[in-house]
Image (cartoon, helix red, strand yellow):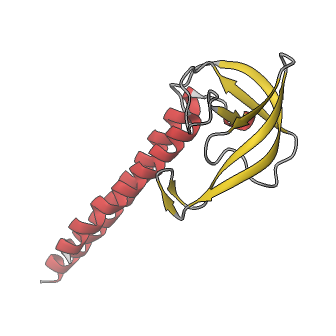
């Protein structure tokens, strides 16, 4: 039984760390500040998943027409998972990144709900590590507890 707990505990810890890293990347604490804001209307999407380079689940990569606060109108490709085919008049932001992704020709565009946040990004990472650590300790602790009870009976 102890060997099983020795295998399960690291798996639980690893799942917690992966969960925390997912939150960390969602809130992108190292991202640049917002360069422009606008309102997007999705015109088309492509689907990837259930397993892809973006992670597990269904991910939509959508093209949208955006009217920016600066007055310009552009067609952009949003980052995967930011928009869905049913989105209409969604507030979006363009961060001060010059790197073009997805072969879209435009800097990354994100849903305004996902603006960069150091507090939420690092908090997600620490929370995931904490949940995984507590789960791993619970598995190991139950094995130690059972062993002590068995020794006391003898």
Question: Residue 132 vs residue 87: left or right?
Answer: left
Q: In which quarter of the image is residue 34?
A: top right
Q: At which x and y percent is residue 11?
A: 32, 62
On the image, which quarter does residue 119 sit in?
top right
Q: Which of 142 and 107 is in front in this view?
A: 107
Q: Is residue 3 above or below residue 67?
A: below
Q: Where is residue 13 in the image (x, y as percent from the top left)?
A: 34, 55
Toward the bottom, the furthest residue is: 154
Query: Which residue is at a point 81% across and 27% down the rendered structure image?
Result: 38
Q: Is residue 130 left or right of residue 30?
A: left
Q: Which residue is more in the foreground, 85 or 20? A: 85
In depth, the one of 148 and 70 nearer the eye is 70
- Asked if 143 appears above or below 72 in the picture, the reply is below
Residue 40 or residue 129, whichever sits in front: 40
Image quarter where the N terminus lies is bottom left
**Image quarter in which the C terminus is found:** bottom left
Q: Residue at x 67, y 44 (%)?
A: 82
Q: x%, y% of residue 130?
A: 42, 47
Residue 141, can we see it? no
């Amino acid at each position: 039984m102890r060997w099983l707990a020795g295998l399960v505990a690291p798996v639980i810890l690893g799942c917690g760390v992966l969960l925390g890293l997912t939150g960390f990347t969602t809130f992108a604490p190292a991202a640049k500040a917002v360069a422009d804001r606008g309102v997007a209307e999705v015109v088309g999407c492509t689907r990837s998943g259930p397993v892809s380079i973006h992670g597990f689940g269904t991910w939509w990569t959508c093209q949208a027409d955006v009217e920016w606060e600066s007055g310009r109108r552009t067609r952009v490709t949003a980052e995967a998972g930011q928009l869905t085919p049913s989105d209409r008049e969604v507030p979006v932001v363009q961060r001060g990144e010059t790197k073009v992704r997805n072969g879209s020709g435009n800097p990354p565009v994100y849903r305004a709900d996902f603006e960069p946040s150091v507090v939420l990004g690092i908090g997600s990472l620490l929370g995931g590590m904490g949940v995984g650590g507590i789960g791993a300790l619970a598995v190991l602790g139950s094995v130690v507890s059972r062993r002590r009870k068995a020794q006391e009976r003898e």
